[in-house]
Image (tube, grey):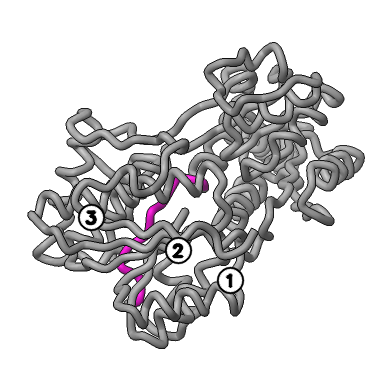
């Protein structure tokens, strides 16, 4: 009996060992430690930073990998580099950076730490060149195609993912007009490329829907807040818009949505969310259900989670390093597979005038190239208007 028990115990221990070896998500099999450095906002912005952090945290918790976020003391490249170096000094060797502002930090820090993997969201070629060209004492002309990135930026341990925000901006604008709104507004945060692409796509979507419906009385107010948070000054502008007849505002830029929501609540009006499905966030903040018409979303969570999985768990860093990937439409049949979209569920206020099937048909036309959306940020908002009236009010601050 004792011999039998010993045999059973030995077999059980062997099986247990095999189970532990085979279960990569219960034990950390790498030396990776993930740090996220916040952008202008923080991990409670209910938008860009928070979504990226939640993806990092979920991935790391599921894979038993240490994770921490670091908030720079200020909004300069020096502040960001200091926080990156602090994370590296503490043993973090996968650095996740959400936001265009990390271009300069990547140029400065990445070459110093060749064993560290740098993964950035929304950092485009132009953001890197602006810093890299300047670092070599040359004058950048803000035309990325005129420059060879490899001559100015060491990308050997860097991967960047950028999005076609103009596409989901278009979707949101088109949906809003189809759903019956004729007086619209765009409130951007800072006039950075991603926010501008959102806004210009929105203008094009509004214009296209108005043209399809034969409308000539659609108007659009357009302004940048100059910051990524709401305040009394920005709310006052939104109050003026809503009092003047604006029905819905696309609030695009982190926490700046609070100013649009505060004003919309007083006017019993509507807003459009950004980056993620913000219907629940906005309802929670306002204490009012049904305020959000839709949201222009980009796949921050799946991009972050899937990239970390492929790089850390699957060991495929070589497939990423040195590249800037542009993420947009990957399916003409299932909108929810795309990196840019509007909510298919209750996050969009569907009606007979614009149904889910109408949305799917629009996405298919975009995927097939029948609908094209410009991402030319050198133009003015009004340049994209053919049948609507656009009032460009510049910036509230800055």
Q: Main secondary structure of the magenta part?
A: strand
Q: Give the x, y percent position of residue 62.
A: 62, 48
Q: Secondary structure at mark 3?
A: loop
Q: Does residue 266 appear to the left or right of 45 in the view shown?
A: left
In space, the residues marked 2 and 1 are separated at their CA atoms by: 10 Å
Please tell me whether residue 294 belongs to the stretch shown in magenta. yes
Residue 10 showing in the rendered view: no
The quarter of the image holding the C terminus is bottom right
Q: Give the x, y percent position of residue 289.
A: 36, 81
Q: Does residue 322 appear to the left or right of 272 in the view shown?
A: right
Residue ID for mark 1 = 230
Residue 139 position (above or below residue 307): above
Q: As rendered, which of 135 and 277 lies closer to the eye?
A: 135
Q: Quadrant of residue 164?
A: top left
Residue 260 position (above or below residue 341): below
In space, the residues marked 1 and 3 are separated at their CA atoms by: 28 Å
First reached walking from the N terminus: tag 3 or tag 2: 2
Q: Secondary structure at mark 1?
A: loop
Residue ID for mark 3 = 388
Q: Give the x, y percent position of residue 17.
A: 69, 34
Q: As rendered, which of 102 and 119 lies closer to the eye?
A: 102
Residue ID for mark 2 = 251
Residue at (51, 27) in percent of width and height: 325
Please tell me whether residue 71 belongs to the stretch shown in magenta. no
First reached walking from the N terminus: tag 2 or tag 1: 1
The part of the chain drawn in magenta is 291-300
């Amino acid at each position: 009996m004792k011999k039998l028990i010993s045999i059973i115990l030995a077999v059980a221990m062997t099986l247990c060992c095999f189970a532990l070896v085979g279960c990569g998500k219960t034990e950390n099999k790498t030396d990776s430690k993930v740090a996220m450095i916040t952008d202008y906002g923080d991990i409670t912005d209910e938008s860009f930073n928070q979504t990226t952090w939640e993806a990092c945290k979920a991935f790391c918790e599921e894979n038993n990998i240490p994770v921490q976020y670091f908030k720079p003391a200020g909004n300069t490249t020096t502040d960001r580099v200091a926080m990156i170096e602090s994370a590296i000094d503490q043993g973090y060797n996968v650095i996740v950076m959400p936001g265009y502002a990390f271009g300069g930090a990547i140029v400065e820090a990445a070459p110093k730490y060749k064993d560290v993997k740098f993964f950035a969201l929304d950092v485009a070629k132009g953001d890197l060149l602006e810093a890299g060209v300047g670092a070599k004492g040359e004058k950048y002309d803000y035309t990325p195609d005129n420059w060879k990135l490899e001559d100015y930026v060491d990308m050997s341990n860097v991967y960047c993912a950028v999005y076609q925000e103009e596409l989901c901006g278009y979707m949101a604008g088109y949906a809003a007009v189809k759903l019956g709104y004729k007086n619209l507004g765009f409130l951007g945060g800072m006039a950075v490329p991603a926010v501008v692409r959102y806004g210009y796509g929105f203008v094009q979507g509004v214009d296209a829907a108005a043209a399809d419906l034969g409308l000539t009385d659609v108007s659009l107010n357009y302004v940048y807040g100059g910051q990524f948070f709401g305040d009394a000054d920005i709310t006052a502008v939104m109050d003026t818009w809503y009092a003047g007849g604006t029905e819905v505002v696309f609030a695009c830029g982190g926490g700046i949505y609070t100013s649009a929501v505060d004003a919309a609540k007083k006017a019993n009006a509507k807003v459009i969310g950004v980056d993620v499905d913000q219907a629940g966030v906005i309802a929670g903040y306002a204490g009012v259900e049904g305020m959000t018409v839709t949201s222009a979303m980009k796949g921050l969570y799946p991009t972050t989670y899937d990239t970390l999985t492929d790089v850390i768990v699957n060991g495929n860093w070589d497939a990423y390093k040195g590249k800037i990937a542009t993420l947009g439409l990957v399916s003409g049949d299932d909108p929810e597979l795309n990196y840019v979209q509007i909510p298919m569920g209750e996050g969009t206020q569907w009606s007979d005038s614009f149904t889910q099937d109408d949305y799917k048909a629009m996405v298919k036309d975009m995927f097939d190239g029948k609908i094209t959306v410009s991402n030319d940020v050198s133009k003015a908002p009004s340049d994209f208007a053919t049948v609507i009236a656009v009032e460009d009010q510049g910036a509230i601050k800055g």
